[in-house]
Image (cartoon, rainbow, N blue to C red):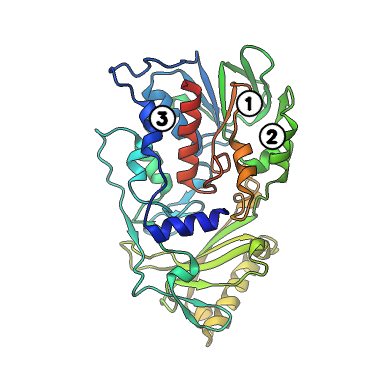
């Protein structure tokens, strides 16, 4: 089953993915959080995105020593946000909640914590989209938005910053891009581009697949042919997002585009102000695959602005977009040095995803939106769940 089919089924059934039962093993029955487990001396986590922080948070709850090595100068990875463009945070990366809100408490994994993060779902009866090609009205289910929810005046980044970061912040070492991982000995030796070496008994790798595809990290010994082939063969979509502020709200909840073939990419304009406590009219653009190339390859910011406005004027007519334009912001995920792209495309082979997520020699464990069991991928909740799976395997 492809990811898009799996998520559509979850949406139709109104369910979240099974998760809590897996975490039962991360809580002890006798009050000792480390009782009955194979406890590593130390763990190195590579990457301070959703998976890296979620893994560190769980290890902290178990009082297990760890360090997080982050390539960039900040945490969050592809949960990046902009807090200066609007009077509510703009998610430049991960935006929607694709499962039930109960996933928040499952990620926090502490019943004593009261979670105040709020989300809003779309109204299947009154909200609608249109096809850009002919203006035909379509339902949200036609676009695939059945269970998806918007964060209200916050983002995934805010959730992790509030509930997960406090337990891991002191353990993060920034500006440490990794270029080699040697797991040939009893200890795993991780070396960054600054020449600094770190050692641990276990390593959790959350490096985006595109970085591994580019050969930026050398493994000793080399990964198995099966593992390396999975890394090489997965399709990572190019990606970008744009946000445009207008004086008037002339658009519906969604403006959908048909990509041919559908496996080549996706493109969607959407009401980014939906559910927010704001009077600003902000339209978002989400594009991946070949659809993103159109925007990423434009030669200047002015060309980008003009292209978007002309595109919207073609849909709504009367220069309505151009005449009400105020400003815009743009995020090219291909140009991010420690991402180099968006995420693995929805139509990837699930068995290949499963191979990506498998551990190596009980020393290297993989977590992130790409390193899952193959049931789901390319989302923040999938990244967090993969981190929990990796920690569970380390402690088994």
Viewer-nearest of discs 3 and 1: 1
Which residue does the image show at 63% across and 72% down from the upper left? 307
Q: Quadrant of residue 388?
A: top left
Q: Which mark is residue 169?
A: none
Q: Position of residue 220 (x, y in %)?
A: 72, 22
Query: Is residue 107 among the parts visible in the rendering?
Result: yes
**Label 3 or label 1, whichever comes before in sequence order:** 3
Residue bearing mark 2:
227
Which residue does the image show at 28% across and 42% down from the upper left? 115
Q: Position of residue 371 (x, y in %)?
A: 57, 39
Q: Quadrant of residue 70?
A: top right
Measured Cα–Cα span from mark 1 to mark 2: 9 Å
Q: Which mark is residue 360?
A: 1
- Total marks placed: 3
Which residue does the image show at 25% across and 39% down from the upper left? 114
Q: Nearer the viewer, residue 46 or 122?
A: 122
Helix, strand or loop at mark 2: helix
Measured Cα–Cα span from mark 3 to mark 2: 27 Å
Vertical position of residue 165 compared to residue 151: above or below? above
Query: Is residue 164 among the parts visible in the rendering?
Result: no
Q: Position of residue 40 (x, y in %)?
A: 49, 15
Vertical position of residue 111 compared to residue 313: above or below? above
> Given contact means CB atoms under 8 Å apart, are the residues at marks 1 and 2 in contact?
yes
Residues packed near mark 3 inside 10 Å, few (<14), some (14 to 19) or many (20 plus): many
Residue bearing mark 3:
57
Viewer-nearest of discs 3 and 2: 2
């Amino acid at each position: 089953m492809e990811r898009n089919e799996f998520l559509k089924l979850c949406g139709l059934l109104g369910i979240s993915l099974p998760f809590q039962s897996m975490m039962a093993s991360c809580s002890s029955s006798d009050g000792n959080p480390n009782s009955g487990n194979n406890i590593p001396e130390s763990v190195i986590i590579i990457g301070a995105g959703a998976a890296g922080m979620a893994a560190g948070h769980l290890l902290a709850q178990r009082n297990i020593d760890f360090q997080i090595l982050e390539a960039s100068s900040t945490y969050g990875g592809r949960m990046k946000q902009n807090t200066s463009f609007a009077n509510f945070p703009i998610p430049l990366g991960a935006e929607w909640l694709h499962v039930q809100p109960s996933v928040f408490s499952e990620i926090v994994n502490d019943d004593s914590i009261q979670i105040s993060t709020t989300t809003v779902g779309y109204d299947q009866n009154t909200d609608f989209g249109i096809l850009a090609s002919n203006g035909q009205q379509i339902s949200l289910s036609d676009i695939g938005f059945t269970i998806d929810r918007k964060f209200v005046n916050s983002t995934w980044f805010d959730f992790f910053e509030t509930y997960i970061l406090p337990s891991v912040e002191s353990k993060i070492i920034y500006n440490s891009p990794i270029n080699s991982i040697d797991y040939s000995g009893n200890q795993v030796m991780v070396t960054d581009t600054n020449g600094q070496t770190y050692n641990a008994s276990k390593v959790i790798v959350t490096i985006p697949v595109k970085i591994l595809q580019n050969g930026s990290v050398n493994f000793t010994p080399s990964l198995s042919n099966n593992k390396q082939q999975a890394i090489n063969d997965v399709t990572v979509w190019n990606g970008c997002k744009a946000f445009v502020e207008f004086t008037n709200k002339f658009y519906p909840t969604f403006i959908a585009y048909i990509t041919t073939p559908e496996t080549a990419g996706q493109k969607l304009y959407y009401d980014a102000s939906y559910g927010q406590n704001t009077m600003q009219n902000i339209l978002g653009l989400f594009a991946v695959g070949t659809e993103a190339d159109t925007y990423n390859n434009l030669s200047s910011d002015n060309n980008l602005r003009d292209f978007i406005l002309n595109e919207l004027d073609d849909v709504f007519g009367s220069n309505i977009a151009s005449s009400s334009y105020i400003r815009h912001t743009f995020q090219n995920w291909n140009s991010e040095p420690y991402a180099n792209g968006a995420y693995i495309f929805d139509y990837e082979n699930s068995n290949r995803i499963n191979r990506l997520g498998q551990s190596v020699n009980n020393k290297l464990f993989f977590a992130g939106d790409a390193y899952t069991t193959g049931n789901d991928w390319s989302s923040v909740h999938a990244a967090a769940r993969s981190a929990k799976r990796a920690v569970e395997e380390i402690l088994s």
